[in-house]
Amino acid sequence: MNLENMVLNKELADIKDQVKSIFFYRICGTGMGACACLAKEAGFEVAGADVTFSPPMSTYLETLDIPLKNLDELTHQDLQKYDLIVVGNSVPRNSEHAKFVEQAGVSFTSFPSFLGEFILKEREVIGLAGTHGKTTSTYFLAQMLENLGEEAGYFVGGIIDGRPPSRLGKSKYFIIESDEYDSAYFQKISKFRLYKLNHMILTSLEYDHADIFESIEDIKKEFAAIIPHLSGCIVANDDYTAIKELEQEFPQKEWKYYGTKTPTGPSHIKSNEKLSSFHLELDGKDYLFETNVVGVHNILNISACIKVLFEVGFTVEKLQQSVKHLAMVKRRQEVRGFYHHSLVIDDFAHHPKAITLTLDALKAKYPHKKLVTVFEPISATARSSVFQKEFARSLQKSPQVIIAVNPLKTTVEKSKNLDTQQLVNDLNSSGVEAKEIFDVDTLMSQLKDWSGEDKLIAVLSNRTCIGLWESKFVQELI
């Protein structure tokens, strides 16, 4: 690697006043696109390039008049028109793309470093971290602040219906989804370590990202690196052993707890298809909250947001009003329509715990429906054998299961590929009717056979589910 032009931390801060124009290399990723939107809003001249440009991110970028170029057409002369290159973490180490950036003769950095130094430095930043629920909780918190009259800045790592994925805002608060994935090929630390966080919500902590971390201990080390630098509170779900271990390591920090097993978590949860109510303890007193959001895991997410806003000074009465009407991000229990009389739900779940939480929530919300679950194991970790047994246990909650098999092999070192046939065999042995399917046409045919007015089809994938969401299936939904 040639890192002569890499600028991070102090070096980046030193050149901040000289930077007027920025080029985003791999701009169409969710995080990179949202970052580019913030840079444009902050007054920088912004452009970018990528391999493909797909809606909705490409649409957001075009709406902001951000020039886009195909990477195959990009020259060093193009890059040299800009003061700074922000490199996406999808660019691999020692790849042709990495070498192309390194040889351009232009200062380059990661998008978390850019956010930390250029956008977040003077704000009161609340980070939403953890294995599950980050995107949903970030959007909940941004909406709650809006309902409280605060035009907060936000950065959401997901697709939001009717609004951009990021906003600078005008209040002192900035809400940011804070994931533990690597910042860039040249900056192998978790993104959240660069976000200048004051407060943190820690929703959960389990093993994931096997392509980056060898164990849960490696993930805990990343959190241990940032916790000493937090100036405010940590609102944590103490249902998780790894979170309790972090608290024991840093007892001097201000920890506030919620969860299903703690007295300070939500209790007396009642839900139907449209409304939920729950009680939550704040400063030793019990309060009733009502919301249009359903599902225990979503009530937990909302409880965390209530607690952090209570700690920064908002009153209970205002917080009770702030949660009454909240929207979900797309691909989180999103109703897509009906397929041959079956309700179709799209969800991003791809970790065993997320699958369990999602299926439990759907069963609670639609108690009279029989689940048909389509699961595409497509992330690097899901394609590995790391969760071979755990996937079988999670999917047993559905009477009928289809494993949508993508031919991609895992990139997790020291791991075999997920044995999808064994997964199907294990499910069938447990009493589940399970099949593995390799193409969209067969998948649609099987879904048609299993459909009915009493069925709910849950499609679980963090991509397109072997092309299902890009096929005629979408047009056939009513």
Image (cartoon, rainbow, N blue to C red):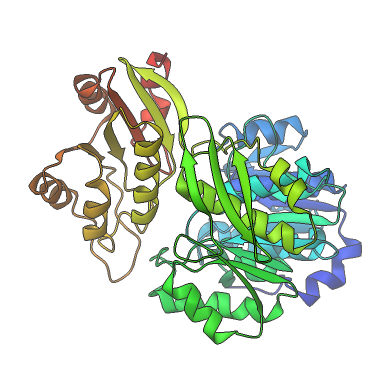
Which is nearer the eye, 160 or 86? Answer: 160
Q: Which residue is drawn at the image coordinates 65% and 35% (left, top)?
A: 325
Which is nearer the eye, 70 or 284? Answer: 284
Q: Is residue 219 visible?
A: no
Q: Residue furthest right?
A: 17
226 vs 408, left or right, is right
Give the number of marks.
Answer: 0
On the image, which quarter does residue 190 sit in? bottom right
User: Where is 407 relative to 11, above or below?
Assistant: above
Q: Residue furthest front?
A: 285
Residue 29 x/y as whole percent: 58, 46
User: Where is 14 relative to 46, above or below?
Assistant: below
Residue 218 x/y as whole percent: 45, 77
On the image, which quarter does residue 20 sit in? bottom right
142 vs 136, left or right, is right
The quarter of the rendered structure image containing the C terminus is top left
Q: Residue furthest left?
A: 429
Q: Which residue is drawn at the image coordinates 64% and 76% (left, top)?
A: 226
151 vs 462, left or right, is right
Q: Is residue 67 visible?
A: yes
Which is nearer the eye, 260 or 2? Answer: 260
Residue 257 x/y as whole percent: 57, 67
Residue 50 x/y as whole percent: 59, 44
The quarter of the rendered structure image containing the N terminus is bottom right
Which is nearer the eye, 92 or 299? Answer: 299
53 vs 338, left or right, is right
On the image, which quarter does residue 117 sit in? bottom right
Q: Which residue is drawn at the image coordinates 21% and 52% (left, top)?
A: 392
